[in-house]
Amino acid sequence: MKEKIKQSAIKLFYKKGYFATGMRTLANAVGIQKASIYHHYPSKEDILMDIFRTTMIDLQDMLRTCLDEASSTMEKFQAAIKGHIIFHIERKEEVIIADSELRGLTADNYKEIIQMRDDYEKEIQRLLKEGVVEGIFPEMDINVISYAILTMCSAVPLWFKKSGRLSKEEVADIYTAMILKGLARS
Amino acid sequence: MKEKIKQSAIKLFYKKGYFATGMRTLANAVGIQKASIYHHYPSKEDILMDIFRTTMIDLQDMLRTCLDEASSTMEKFQAAIKGHIIFHIERKEEVIIADSELRGLTADNYKEIIQMRDDYEKEIQRLLKEGVVEGIFPEMDINVISYAILTMCSAVPLWFKKSGRLSKEEVADIYTAMILKGLARS
DNA sequence: GTCTATAGATGGATAGAC
DNA sequence: GTCTATCCATCTATAGAC
């Protein structure tokens, strides 16, 4: 039942936004009374925080798997980009919540999530640095380039249509090709 | 006074979000009673809509100026990217509201803003197409590439610090260089 | 574990005095 | 053009029965 509440919350927070979704609306979607929600979650923010934590942990796990399965820096980088995009398409609702509802978190929760996000960014930046050291990438502004890459890839679910012309793999390949070309040594 | 309400609303909607900002909070920020706001705006959504319209119109005007002042397709494209990024840094609060509070708009207002956004996207896509026809860009998936470019450039205000290491022009130049290299004919 | 009932605050919006 | 006062709906959360 806790999971059912969470799944309904994901759909509603995605569609209407966290502050615009009331506990009554959420309860109706689940098929229970709003008071019953408080048996599973101590507060509305805890539901949001549960979504944040699951999403960030799964994202971290996905990255770790991608890195473990690749050998060279170039392969790791390509796998990270592709994995990031595919995760963001498959988990569209959750990642859009994670990117747009940070203001729903109070100070301590906010810090925890920002920390996880920073750790993830640093992994990508570490890959870029390794690529520069190995000479497969030219000298670059690591921070700016990493933000450019991460923000464009995280935004894919904002326009991607599952029933559209391209599969998620095709989109990931187009993005990866453009990024690698943009970073290539001249 | 209407302008003062609008400016306070921009700051609050940016900081706390549209739904999380109450009319009382807004009125306090302006220094009046909440009932007084209704002398200037018929509803809360009309304040949001005013912000949306101003932002989108100014963005369109900026693009038009960039295109008029450049001659070749390549110059127009570069000017458009640079102008887009600098606008998004200078108007940080408004563009972040425009990108995250669309759910605060009812159907008719929503349609109007989406139409303006689509028109803007089409201008960028038209530039890319011209570049392909002229042979300065290789064949590409125009839609996907245009989304990649627009989303990464629109996200700059999410991480850019005015007091940081780089000026907005420097960031715009780094982005433009990476994008052009990513699009270059091989 | 879910329910009914309700507390207590706050939401957007309006009426009418000045 | 701003104010006080107020309407009514909704909000998050709790109490206590079953």
Image: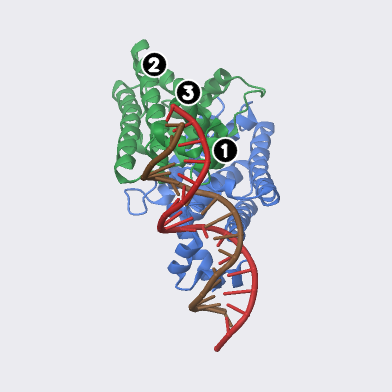
Chain colours: A blue, B green, C brown, D red
Nearest the viewer among A123 and D2 is: D2
Mark 2 vs mark 3: in front:
3
Disc ID at residue B15: 1
Are the residues flagged by discs 2 and 3 in contact, CB closer than 8 Å? no
Q: Which residue is mark 3?
A: B87
Secondary structure beneath dot 2 equals helix
Nearest the viewer among B185 and B166 is: B166
Nearest the viewer among A107 and A95 is: A107
Looking at the image, which residue is at 39% across and 27% down? B54
- Amino acid of disc 1: Lys
Point out residue B98 in the picture as x, y percentages from the top left corner.
44, 36
Secondary structure beneath dot 1 equals helix
Residue A43 falls left or right of residue A9: right
Mark 3 vs mark 1: in front:
1
Secondary structure beneath dot 3 equals helix
Q: Mark 2 and mark 3: span between their CA atoms?
A: 11 Å
Determine whether A53 is above or below A173 in the image.
below
Point out residue B183 in the picture as x, y percentages from the top left corner.
43, 28
Determine whether A84 is above or below B130 in the image.
below
Q: Upstream in the sequence, badge 3 or badge 1?
A: 1
